[in-house]
Amino acid sequence: MQHLIKTSDFTKEEILELFEDAKNYKDMKSNKILEGKIIVNLFFENSTRTRSAFETAAKRLGAEVISLDLGTSSRSKGETIFDTVANINATKPDAIIIRHEDSGAPEALSSCVDCPIINAGDGSHAHPTQALLDLFTIMEHFQGNTEGKKIAIVGDAKNSRVAGSNKKLLPRFGMEVVFVAPDCFKYESTTHKQYDNLNEIIDEVDVVMSLRTQLERHNEIYFSSPYEYAKDYCITKDVFGDRDILLMHPGPVNRNIDISDEMLEDKRNKVLEQVTNGVLVRMAILKKLILQK
Ligand code: NCD
């Protein structure tokens, strides 16, 4: 039985096979590949995109989905996460999708269940399905040719699980990952170059990924207002000019802080394409993990 806790749980070959399968679902037609299967969504943290994309993906494949919003249920009654998951597991689902604010929670829980666990984001550690859909989006744009392409990840990489997964996944497909951030969001790295300002490298990059500032994970105040951050890090038409660069963001986007209104309308912006691709890629992931169980 295979889980998806981090992107390295899949080999390169498995990822390329997943992407081939994901392309089959572009017409968004429903099928019965997972008919009779039951998937439980356990979200201990808020989610819009990831949760709805998983639900849509499961339903498009004919599976039933049970979504529990645990932010408000079991924990308020004092149950530990291990007991909650043991109880869900005892109902014999075919897969469990977990989002939790603690890094490492899905991994720890994976040894206590009889079905695949899919990590839908754990603390600031990993968000493997987001990174896979990001890579899929980049591959679709460059016709599979990611070798030598350079991506600048702009913003709070230090606290972002999306950055955490992408910085490991994208180099496996030949991409160079660099970071652009104020000092407070830089993290210790000897592997990746880090810059203060996007202007320093804008002429060298093929992709820019903007990130939301992860305020919920900060224990001090770094900026007197979001606009103080935005004045240097918001992605605007002034910064992009007419360059042929792909603009991405995992969402939720803070308008005019992460990306300007104008750039959200720009055809180089792939944010909604990422969301659609998130359904296709998750369809392929659910099919792979549930059917090979
Ligand atoms: C991200 C997350 O939750 O990690 N969003 C997502 O899943 N699409 C990024 C964020 O919250 O900023």
Image (cartoon, helix red, strand yellow):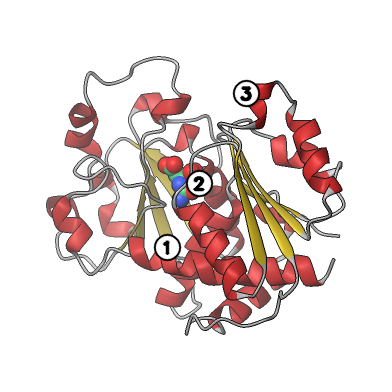
Quick check: 176 left or right of 234? right
Question: From the viewer's perspective, is the residue at label 3 or at label 1 nearer?
Answer: 3
Q: Position of residue 83 (x, y in %)?
A: 80, 32
Visible residue check, residue 206: no
Label 1 sits on what residue type?
Answer: Val
Label 2 sits on what residue type?
Answer: Val
Using the numbered discs, state the Cα–Cα distance from disc 2 to disc 1 in whole angstroms: 14 Å
Q: Position of residue 65 (x, y in %)?
A: 64, 60
- Image disc number at residue 275: 1
User: In what element is the residue under mark 2?
Assistant: helix
Q: Quadrant of residue 269?
A: bottom left
Q: Are marks 3 and 1 in contact (CB under 8 Å)?
A: no
- Count of labels in the image: 3
| Residue on which disc 2 sits | 162
Q: Is mark 2 within 8 Å of ligand 1?
A: yes
Question: From the viewer's perspective, is the residue at label 2 or at label 1 nearer?
Answer: 1
| Residue on which disc 3 sits | 76
Using the numbered discs, state the Cα–Cα distance from disc 3 to disc 1 in whole angstroms: 32 Å
Q: Quadrant of the N terminus?
A: bottom right
User: In what element is the residue under mark 3?
Assistant: helix
246 vs 260: above or below: below
Q: Quadrant of residue 193?
A: top left
Using the numbered discs, state the Cα–Cα distance from disc 3 to disc 2 in whole angstroms: 28 Å
